[in-house]
């Protein structure tokens, strides 16, 4: 359990590294660092739960929905279909899994949560990003913008 907590905290620190280096090329990870459910009562799970709750609230969803499983890959990109991307959502038996690289940022996590919530509430995860929620709830567009160093602390906190 302690190892999972440390690994998930590394994900958030990896996001800081990715944000400060300004890297533009995505390197697809090949090694799975963690795969499974978010652990109850872990600091990292609490952070993911805060993002999830805020995205749900932004989307106006009040009914309880399960958190997706998480798969964390090394590198700063993941294979999603035929493309390398910042993150990916895969639904499996209506549970769902978000796949993120260790070098990520909160906006990518929110983006994948939007896919998950859409799938659970409508049956359509909106792969074409046609709904307003991706922009309105912080899950599209911003993910490719690197914040200035003086705003890093704001961007790493849940909003």
Image (cartoon, grey):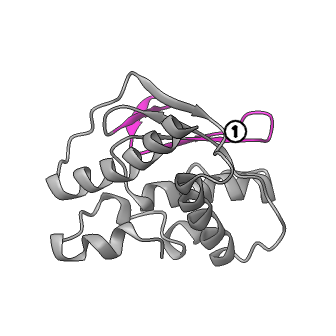
Residue lying at 59% horizontally and 67% vertically, measured from the top left: 50
Residue at screen point 79% across, 58% down = 65
Residue at 32% x, 52% y is 13
Q: How many marks?
A: 1
Magenta stretch: residue 29 in it? no
Residue 52 sits in quarter:
bottom right
Please state the horizontal and vertical placement of residue 66, each as a whole percent of the image: 77, 53
In the rendered image, the quadrant that contains the N terminus is top right
Position above or below: 158 against 13: below
Q: Which residues are magenta?
A: 77-98
Q: Is residue 62 left or right of residue 151?
A: right
Residue at the farthest right position: 63
Residue 80: within the magenta?
A: yes
Residue 131 visible within the image:
no
User: Is any part of residue 147 visible from this angle?
Assistant: yes
The residue where tag 1 is placed is 91
In the image, 46 versus 110, the foreground residue is 46
| Residue 19 percent across, percent down from the top left | 24, 57
**Residue 30, percent from left and from top:** 38, 22
Q: Residue at 62% of width from left, 53% of height from top?
A: 115
Q: Secondary structure at mark 1?
A: loop
Residue 155 placement, left or right of 120? left
Q: Residue furthest front?
A: 2
Residue 148: percent from left, percent from top: 18, 71
């Amino acid at each position: 359990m302690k190892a999972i907590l440390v690994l998930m905290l590394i994900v958030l620190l990896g996001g800081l590294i990715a944000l400060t280096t300004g890297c533009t090329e995505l390197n697809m990870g090949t090694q799975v660092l963690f795969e499974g459910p978010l652990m109850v009562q872990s600091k990292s799970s609490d952070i993911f739960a805060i993002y999830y709750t805020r995205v749900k609230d932004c989307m106006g969803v009040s009914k309880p929905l399960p958190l997706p499983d998480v798969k964390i890959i090394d590198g700063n990109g993941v294979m999603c279909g035929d493309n390398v991307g910042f993150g990916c959502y895969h639904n499996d038996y209506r549970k769902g899994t978000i796949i993120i690289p260790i070098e990520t940022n909160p906006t990518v996590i929110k983006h994948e949560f939007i896919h998950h919530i859409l799938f659970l509430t409508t049956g359509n995860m909106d792969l074409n990003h046609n709904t307003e929620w991706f922009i309105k709830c912080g899950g599209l567009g911003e993910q490719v913008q690197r914040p200035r160093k003086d705003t890093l602390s704001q961007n790493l906190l849940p909003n």
